[in-house]
Image: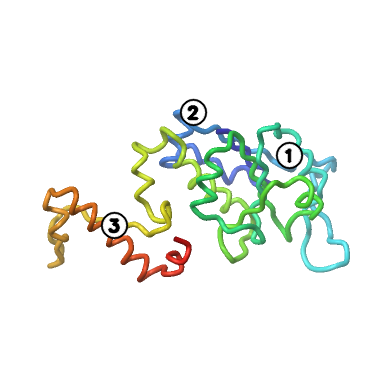
């Protein structure tokens, strides 16, 4: 997978190749991540990319020209152009699963009061939000999307079960996890996990996933 990030702040992503699983994915060529500075496509001598909104109002709006040229510079027939936006569809595991099958993602990071809507209407394939709140720009949402999509690519994690058993993958939250020591401050690990009986352990984990989901996110059960 190739991921092109269109941003006004490419330095934000400088340490991406050093970051845990994403860094390993880049090193092993599972993904190829490039940052494109939108300012490089400004025709203004001061590299200006924003202007006042028509109709008045606070703040500035990113102009369509530099964004269009930046998208055109990297787009191919196999590209999917995503605008990280608080108005977008909320990112979930199903969306991550779908995006992980794409060959080329172009992630557009907005800033200021947003971008000229003509870009959204005509040159964006999908708007995605990471939650019902507003951030300063699209860089943090882009990182979140890259992280949750990258870990689903073959060869990135040590095994497929590393993500299949996790929260949200099958619509339920993950069962509780424990490690050594067997007893901590008087609290013991459930005996079934020490039994060596794989069938009973699997049954316990399934029932615990349902219990945890019912307690913490009962809304998820409505979708099953």
In the rendered image, residue 83, in percent from the top left (x then y), is placed at 67, 50
Instruction: Give the left or right position of residue 210, taking residue 6 as reference.
Output: left
Q: In the visual, does 49 lie left or right of 198?
A: right
Q: Give the percent coordinates (x, y) of residue 175.
A: 30, 58
Marks 1/2 in contact by CB < 8 Å: the verdict is: no
Which mark is drawn over residue 71? 1
**Which residue is at a point 79% across and 53% down the rendered structure image?**
50
Q: Which residue is mark 3?
A: 206
Q: Outermost residue, right direction?
A: 55
> Is residue 26 or residue 214 the one in the foreground?
214
Picture layout, residue 174 above or below residue 32? below
Hey, which residue is sitting farthest front in the picture? 224
Tell me the mark number nearer the camera, choosing from 1 and 3: 3
Query: CA–CA distance between discs 1 and 2?
Result: 23 Å
| Residue 45 in which image quadrant | top right
Q: Earlier in the sequence, mark 2 or mark 3?
A: 2
Q: Secondary structure at mark 1?
A: helix
Q: Quadrant of residue 162?
A: top left
């Amino acid at each position: 997978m190739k991921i092109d990030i269109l941003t006004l702040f490419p330095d934000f992503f400088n340490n991406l190749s050093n970051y845990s699983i994403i860094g390993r994915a880049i090193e092993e060529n599972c993904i190829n991540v490039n940052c494109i500075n939108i300012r490089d496509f400004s025709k203004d001598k001061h590299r200006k990319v924003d202007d006042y909104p028509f109709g008045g109002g606070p703040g500035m709006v990113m102009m369509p020209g530099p964004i269009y040229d930046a998208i055109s510079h990297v787009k191919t027939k196999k590209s999917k152009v995503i605008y990280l936006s608080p108005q977008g569809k909320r990112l979930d595991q199903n969306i991550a699963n779908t995006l992980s099958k794409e060959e080329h993602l172009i992630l557009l990071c907005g800033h200021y009061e947003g971008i000229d809507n003509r870009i959204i209407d005509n040159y964006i394939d999908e708007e995605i939000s990471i939650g019902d709140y507003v951030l300063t720009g699209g860089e943090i949402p882009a990182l979140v999307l890259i992280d949750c999509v990258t870990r689903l690519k073959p060869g990135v994690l040590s095994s497929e079960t590393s993500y299949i058993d996790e929260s949200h993958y099958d619509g339920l939250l993950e069962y509780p996890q424990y490690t050594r020591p067997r007893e901590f401050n008087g609290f013991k690990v459930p005996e079934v996990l020490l039994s060596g009986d794989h069938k009973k352990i699997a049954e316990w984990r399934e029932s615990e996933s349902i219990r945890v989901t019912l307690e913490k996110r009962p809304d998820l059960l409505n979708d099953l």
